[in-house]
Image (tube, rainbow, N blue to C red):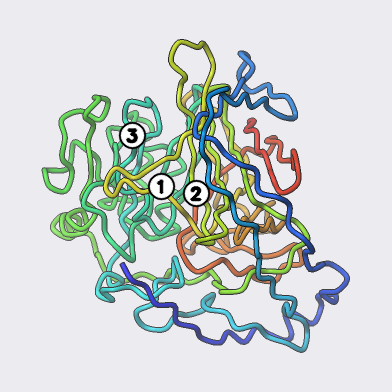
Amino acid sequence: MVRKLIKSVLFVSILFLSSCQSIADTVMQASQPPQIPTYIPEETISIPETPFQFPPTFTVVIPTETATVPPTPAITATIDPSLPTATSTPLVLGLTGFPPGINPLTGLAVADPLLLDRRPVMVKVSNYPRSGRPHAGLSYADVVFEYYIGEECNRFLAVYYGQDAPKVGPMRSGRLVDAQLVFMYQGVLAYGNADPQVDEVLVEKLGKRAISFNDSPCPPVCGHDTHSVTGVFVDTAEMSKFSEKEGVDNIRQDLNGIIFNEKPWASDQFGIQVAVQYSRRDRGEWHYDPGTGQYLRWIEAEKPGYKDQYYMIPLVDRLNNEQISFSNVIIIFANYIEYAPTLHEIEILNNTEGQRAILFRDGLMIEGKWRTVSPEEPIHFTDLRGIPLGLKPGNTWIVIAGMSSSFEEVSSGIWEMHFALP
């Protein structure tokens, strides 16, 4: 879909910014970028057998076979040195309002503005078992949340608002944190058959907006078993129609709170690759592509004939066979509460003071904070001084890391997050 970026001017409050120190004291403009490493499709990652205990770095064994890899262009990051001060305001889009036809979750114009006159559709998508890959419809999402669900595995919650996907999945069960996220983004939740205690919370908090596999005909939810190899999939447009038939007030919601800026925040840290590792067998990577300005998703695959040996492959969307790419990748740190090995709550709504957030955009790594202003607003992002942080217009992938998770730069511009509870 062709999207056209529309800008508007946000006059950031002089009173709010007057207490901030000069940008020259806290932010430096980046110099020469590091060389982007060359990636060969079969990279074998040797990971320790004991889960959740990781060395500072991981070993990459490149196969001896000769591979032809096209040269990787150097990063040409465009950095905006004119950040907001007490006497200047940047050209940004969002926070308190968006022009008609602009998606408040991406900052982009939508092909069909009528799509914005509804609630977002939020779908639970499985990442394990691997037989369910490649996923369907993740590249169509405006926002994707990724978080730990226990037993060394993660799961996704994909948000569809500015465009629909005819097939999203494989769909799997809901988790406790979904009630908070769906309430914040005022969405309709499509999920598999959750545990009774989880299902009770989802229905209590979301009412008719919590729509499970058992409650849905085909369409919008088609398939026979959420745990089968063939899986169950959701048509997001049909889910919007079905929710209305079920009595959901499927009207446009106030989704303000996010700022989008075409120019990146000034940073002296490069972010050309970020890895997210939940366990010895669960790893995802984002590789920055300077040609498109996007982060491309890679995922682990088990190497045949080798125990606990994995190699990284491009993660594609089965709907278009294209590698999944996102404009923003954000890691936020939150407190996990473990009730059982596969039953967790994550503290999202109570973060009014702000917790650590790491933004990757345009080949840069930017330290910031995330917070929840109210239970009915999307997550807000700021820099370390509390100034609203502009995301790159486009889609956003948000990783929810435990507070004890490690995060470090293992080589120039290459970062690793190793998940740990709580």
Tag 3: residue type?
A: Ser
Q: Residue at x 52, y 50 (%)?
A: 398
Where 255 falls versus 351 (above or below)?
below
Give neighbour class at mark 3: few <14, some 14-19, many 20+ (Cα, 10 Å).
many
Give me the C-alpha separation between circle 1 and circle 2.
7 Å
Q: Residue at x 45, y 52 (%)?
A: 325
Q: Between label 2 and label 3, give the one nearer the viewer.
A: 2
Percent of width and height locating residue 127: 40, 33
Where 104 falls versus 285 (above or below)?
below
Q: Residue at x 35, y 42 (%)?
A: 124
Image-based side of 46 in relation to 385, left or right: left
Percent of width and height locating residue 377: 48, 64
Nearer to me, 223 or 38: 38
Residue located beneath label 3 in the image: 173
- Which quadrant does the C terminus fall into? top right
Tag 2: residue type?
A: Leu
Q: Between label 3 and label 1, give the one nearer the viewer.
A: 1
